[in-house]
Image: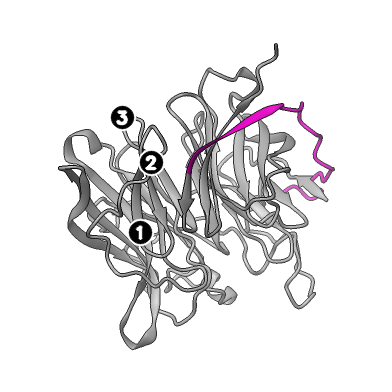
Amino acid sequence: MRSIIAALASMSIAVPAMAAQTDAPKAAASETTVEPVAEGLVHPWGMQFLPDGRMLVTERPGRMRIVGADGRLSDPVQGVPEVFAQRQGGLLDVALARDFTSSRTIFFSFSEPREGGGNGTAVARARLVEAEGAARLEGVEVIFRQQPSFSNGLHFGSRIVIAPDGKLFVTLGERFQMDYSQDLSRHWGKVVRINPDGSAPQDNPFAGRDNARPEIWSYGHRNPQAAGLHPETGELWIVDHGPRGGDEVNAVRKGQNYGWPVINYGTHYSGESIPDKRQGMVQPLYYWVPSIAPSGMAFYTAGRVQQWRGNLFVGALAGRHLARLVLDGVEVKAEEQLLTGLGERIRDVEQGPDGAIYVLTDSPQGRVLRVLPRERS
């Protein structure tokens, strides 16, 4: 059952005693056209439009490519550091600095191999340089490392969102070690907020606190692989993977606890039930049961498709569709499932400069697809 939870009305984390739970109404259907833009990508994970309309796309095995307006793939961008490309690990998200046009600075996340067989999510900064038909990264510097290291290939999180002030939000999975999501001495299961040089802003909620990582912005997350800024409120929103059900849409606020693994609307893989409420822990704005395995999201702000304006689009890996959530402010009012006939895992979602929605499909023959409503004759 898909359920709607009343949106939080303020910064308070108090939960209504009887939160309404209903089947999500179906949104008015969108008859869409799907156009292949690029093919032959190996497990593409993140994409970002460049100012000239081309796309920077990451491939999980450790390659970064530029997709031309004609769909051609560049040779791999040179200078990408070594990545831990096993299971869910590899080269992950990519984002442009606010001043990219002048600085050519990009940020990217990856699962970093470390000494002793460990690994962890890292964020690097570099300059994207293009010359003589080739592209390379210069001045690569790792500015943030998730701590501590751990030896497995699961739950790296890794979406990067750049705020208007240039600071970075980075989502971090709990490495499939769920109890540590509540442990402020670790970066596992957290959203962190860092300066462009990787340092922790002094106004972060746990800066200066003993036994807490100063980069932490919020905690109690599982493995958020979708994130973006709400176009009206400016708040960070994420979509987090649940276990067996309980994928969550959350408005992420400073210092708050989102409950994993203490509360969730799914069940553990063992079949053990999970309480769905506890005082002091934030309720989701929306959740899915059964799980759709969400990855990638985009708020639609363009004027090209009025039916979609203000909607939230979320990719589904296990669900193999694109979810369209109709919003009224911060409340989810209805949902539509798009691209169900493709049968492909949707890894990332972006709004293009042309007002279309673009998605990455996650497979050894991954694609970039352009999605628009079908024009009526």
Question: Over which residues does the magenta segment extend?
Answer: 15-38
State left or right for residue 295 relative to residue 274: left
Report crowding for label 3: few under 14, some 14 to 19, many 20 or more residues within 10 A (C-alpha).
few
Helix, strand or loop status at disc 3: loop
Image vertical order of residue 189 relative to residue 350, above or below: below
Image vertical order of residue 227 relative to residue 280, above or below: above
- Mark drawn on residue 63: 1
User: Contact, CB < 8 Å: mark 3 with mark 1?
Assistant: no
Residue under pointer 3: 52
Residue under pointer 2: 72
Inter-mark Cα distance, 2 to 1: 15 Å
Q: Is residue 238 visible?
A: no
Report crowding for label 1: few under 14, some 14 to 19, many 20 or more residues within 10 A (C-alpha).
many
User: Contact, CB < 8 Å: mark 2 with mark 1?
Assistant: no
Figure disc tally = 3
Which residue is most to the top? Answer: 377
Which amino acid, by three-letter code, is at mark 3?
Answer: Asp
Inter-mark Cα distance, 3 to 2: 15 Å
Which amino acid, by three-letter code, is at mark 1?
Answer: Arg
Query: Where the C terminus falls, by quadrant?
Result: top right
Q: Position of residue 167 (x, y in %)?
A: 32, 46
Which residue is most to the bottom? Answer: 116
Inter-mark Cα distance, 3 to 1: 21 Å
The residue shown at (44%, 61%) is: 60
